Amino acid sequence: MNHTHILAATAAIALSCIPAAAKFPSVDETVAAFKAANGAVEESAKGSATYYIARDASGNAVKVAYLKETRGYKGKLDLFVVVVKGAGGLAFESVQIVEGKNVYKEVTKGAEAAFLKQFSGKTADQKLKVDAMTSATQTSKTITRAIEQEQKNVAALFNAKK
């Protein structure tokens, strides 16, 4: 049994415990929470993403979040990704699907949690290898690709000083 099958079985068990009405956080709530937790946050749009940059007193970026729209198998969805700078370089703090006009019902909260948890702690400059969500392989690949596409932009924001 390979990792995909193990994750699929785990996600299936997790999904059976999650109520169908589980809600994703809204885009506005997610952005507001990031801003509240990180003080003065600079906002910048580039391409298909909007970036939120938290800086230290010296003007160095210490945390970068971005909101990016991507397309899954059956529709569009919005991702909110948080990257932090630590001693080991850039690492994903969190990756989540946020509710908005683009979240569709086939991506459930349980599958999303199991899949997106795999990104946490991975370095943001490496090729990402994650297992797919059960019954959402194309969406899983799309999410991974969307995150990889933003890695250079995120690195550039960390290297730029205000």
Image (cartoon, rainbow, N blue to C red):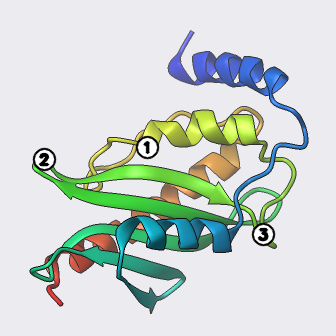
Q: CA distance from mark 3 to mark 2?
A: 34 Å
Report if the CB atoms under discs 3 and 1 are less than 8 Å apart. no
Marks counted in the figure total 3
> Which one is in front, 156 or 53?
53
Residue 45 can be seen, yes or no: yes
Mark positioned earlier in the residue sequence (3 or 2): 2
**Residue at 65% from the left image edge and 68% from the top image edge:** 29
Q: Position of residue 154 (x, y in %)?
A: 31, 72
Element on which disc 2 rests = loop
Q: Tell me the amino acid under the disc marked 2.
A: Gly
Q: Where does label 2 land, which residue? A: 88
Q: Residues within 10 Å of mark 1 (few under 14, many from 20)?
A: many
Query: Can you say which quadrant of the picture contains the N terminus?
Result: top right
Q: Where does label 1 land, which residue? A: 119
Mark positioned earlier in the residue sequence (3 or 1): 3
Q: Position of residue 52 (x, y in %)?
A: 41, 78
**Residue at 77% from the left image edge and 70% from the top image edge:** 100
Element on which disc 1 rests = helix
Q: Position of residue 134 (x, y in %)?
A: 72, 32
Q: Tell me the amino acid under the disc marked 1.
A: Phe
Report if the CB atoms under discs 2 and 1 are less than 8 Å apart. no
Q: Tell me the amino acid under the disc marked 3.
A: Asn
Element on which disc 3 rests = loop
Q: Residues within 10 Å of mark 2 (few under 14, many from 20)?
A: few
Q: Residues within 10 Å of mark 3 (few under 14, many from 20)?
A: some
Report if the CB atoms under discs 3 and 2 are less than 8 Å apart. no
Residue 65 in which image quadrant: bottom left
Residue closest to the far top:
1
Q: Is residue 74 left or right of residue 56?
A: right
